[in-house]
Each structure stands twice: as C-alpha cells, then as structure tokens.
Image (tube, helix red, strand yellow):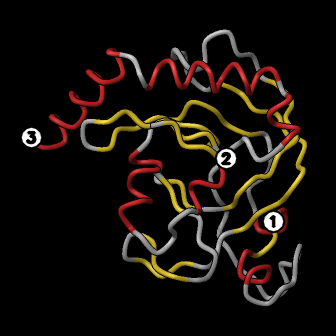
Amino acid sequence: MVILHHCAAAWPAWPEWSEIVGGQFLYTPMQSRGVDCPDSGYNIDVNHIVSPVMDHPITRGIEPFEMTDEVYLSHVFEESIIPLFASSWDFTKDNFYSAANAVVRGELNSNQGWEHPNGSNIVGWIKNYKNAPVVYLQFGDGPAAYQNPNFRRILAQAIQWASSDEAKCWARERSKRAKE
C-alpha cells in the first residue's frame, strides 16, 4: 500500500487504520493507542525542506528539496515505522492550527485554547502491516506538491517498491519476526 497525506485522517476513530498507516490524525480530542490525546494540528501552504534520512529504493536519487504543502502535528508511531523523510519545519503547537477549532467550531487557522505536545518531523516512512508493505507520505496535499518533480519521483519509487517482490518479502519477514 502507498498511503498519501489526508489518508492518515481517513478513519480517526478506527484504531486499526492508524496501525496500518503508522500514525493518526485526530479531528477532535480522543484516544490514540489507549491514551487520551488532544486533536491534531494542521498548517496549509508551508514552505519547508524535505530530506531523505536513509538510503532506500524510495529515497534513491533524492536530495533535500523545497516543498510547499500542508503539514500535520499528529501522532507518528515512531517505534512502528522506519523513517524515510524528515521535514525542516518546527513541529510545535505554535506552528499549527487546531483541527477541532476548524471542524467543530468553524474557526479555521485558529489555535486559541489549544494545547498539543511537540510532534515528530518524520513525514515519510515504511512499515509493514501483517504481510503487506506500507509506504506513508505525509506530503502530497495539492497542486503545488504534485507539480514538484521530487514528489512525483518519490511517489513513483514508492509505488514501484511497495509492489515489488523485495518489499513483499521484507514485509513477510518483519511480520514473522514480530510473531516470534
């Protein structure tokens, strides 16, 4: 599976989806992995630098690049993922807006009364879900992202890797080790 941007927020009340993705975006305060958490944050049209953090078929040929995109202050299950890309953006509450203020109160771009711990700057990763290889790319919100040749290359390489025999074997091995 190759999962892009908003898909992390697709089913916030379905815990299994967040385990498939490797993170969770919450529109309202609720539990994540059994812990009470505040709603997530968003910021649209952020200029930031995305950098590969390891050599992998998805990161090959990619140098740090500038991207204008929406970023999330949400849960990244760092112990369950293998990071591929990090952002230069500062993932602190002052740089984001409350999702609940936007969707519940109709107050776009507001973080009034909102508290949130600092978050992860990891914006792309791989993981397995059972025997399936999973790629998540937090970037990819709209036209500016899709016009970026680096994003298009990363997406193509992510699709190639996730559908490869190599990725399928990797996921099966990780699943097997997790059961031992």
Secondary structure of the residue carrying tag 2 is loop
Residue 94: quadrant of the picture: bottom right
Is the N terminus in the top left, top right, bottom left or bottom right quadrant?
Answer: top left
- Circle 3 crowding by C-alpha within 10 Å: few under 14, some 14–19, many from 20: few
Q: Amino acid at mark 1?
A: Phe
Residue 151: quadrant of the picture: top right
Q: Amino acid at mark 3?
A: Glu
**Mark 3 vs mark 2: which is more N-terminal?**
2
Contact check, label 3 and label 2, Cβ < 8 Å: no
Left or right of 77? Residue 131 is left
47 over 147 or under it: above or below: below
Residue 82: image tag:
none
The Cα atoms of the two marked residues, 2 and 1, are separated by 13 Å
Residue 153 at x, y percent in the picture: 69, 19
Label 1, on which residue?
96
Residue 118: quadrant of the picture: bottom right
Q: Amino acid at mark 2?
A: Asn
Secondary structure of the residue carrying tag 1 is loop
